[in-house]
Amino acid sequence: MTADPFAQLFRSSAELFVQSVDLAGDRLLVQRMAEVDYAQASFLDQRILTEGRARQWFGWDEVEQLTGPLPCTAQAIFHIGHVGSTLLSRLLGEVPGVLGVREPVLLRTLAELRRLRDRPESPWSPERFDHRTAMALGWLSRTFRPDQRALIKATSFVSDLAPAMLAHGQRALFLTVRPDIYLPTILAGEASVQELGALSATRLQRLHGRMGEEPWRLWALSLGERAALGWACEMAALVDAEDAAAAGQLLWVDFDRFLDQPAEMLTVSAKHFGYVVENAQAETLVSGPIMSRYSKAPEHAYSPQLRHDVLAAARREQADEIARGLAWLERAARDYPLIARALERGTRGGH
């Protein structure tokens, strides 16, 4: 592959996907991806690094010099985690003109670096971080055809980058649930409880950083209180990002409202991103296989009724921890304005 054809293909097509960054070597892993690969992938992480897909490491500066800056035209779904974002992304990905880009690792790494942006231990200067974030958003905006537009479905903690994306003028959807739904959702499954353990420390760090004070100690929080901390942290990131948005740039969606009226909410969501989805088309999509499979692992069946049953069981079995978590959240909202804003926004819901 010579430099000029590579640069031309990179600038014009999502075929050359920037999968990850090696910070120590300042390198980018670029992998060939077909359009169907994007459609099938729930996560654009190490799970796409399979045999038969050509990939190669390139120096970051080498790629940047070859391609130059690319415009950020991608739109995005930001969310608080475990709220149906993959499901909504897959449904919207069926709309002509949408290229779904689900959970790119590159944005996860940049979100982690964002916490170090102004600190002396950051590997990049603040100026380089901002510049490279803009470059990455341009790379993730590429599509396969001129009539397509990328729709990034971010990982939950990537909401810290939402203001950077909104600054480019693109639209975003913020997907949430009320805390009384979120807590049993997290406490219902072994995998989500393990994830809670893995993320709680950085969530507390992120929330404290946003508040400008450190009132809590992780070791003192029960399991239910840590789940409430997760909700507060991710909601605080979204309400902070809302401050950077222009009128009409954001759409808040409550996932339970979506499940109650999926065809209507799919139409509303598509319209927000600039697509026309007729009622009949929406009904066909929400009556199809996407709504009956677990979106992160489509080989498994799932449904709104199964979700209802799982939540009901969690409310019975984890009643004490759920109560502790909700009480912690109420106390935090009384004492700290940022948590109060998050709680008001989260209980108000959206469309």
Image (cartoon, helix red, strand yellow):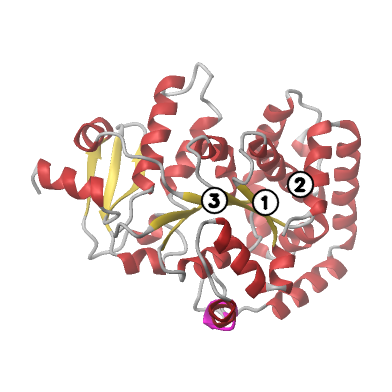
**291 drawn magenta:** yes
Disc ID at residue 155: 3
Determine the secondary structure under disc 1. helix
Disc ID at residue 226: 2
Q: Callout 1: 10 Å neighbours few (<14), some, many (20+)?
A: some
In the rendered image, residue 131, in percent from the top left (x then y), is placed at 39, 28
Viewer can see residue 220: no
* Mark 3 residue type: Thr
Report the mark closest to the observer, 2 or 3: 3
According to the picture, the residue beneath numbered tag 1 turns out to be: 196
* Mark 2 residue type: Arg
In the rendered image, residue 27, in percent from the top left (x then y), is placed at 29, 36
**249 drawn magenta:** no
Q: CA distance from mark 2 to mark 3?
A: 19 Å
Measured along the vertical axis of the image, is residue 87 above or below residue 172?
below
In the rendered image, residue 217, in percent from the top left (x then y), is placed at 78, 33
First of labels 1, 2 by sequence position: 1
Q: Is residue 13 left or right of residue 114?
A: left
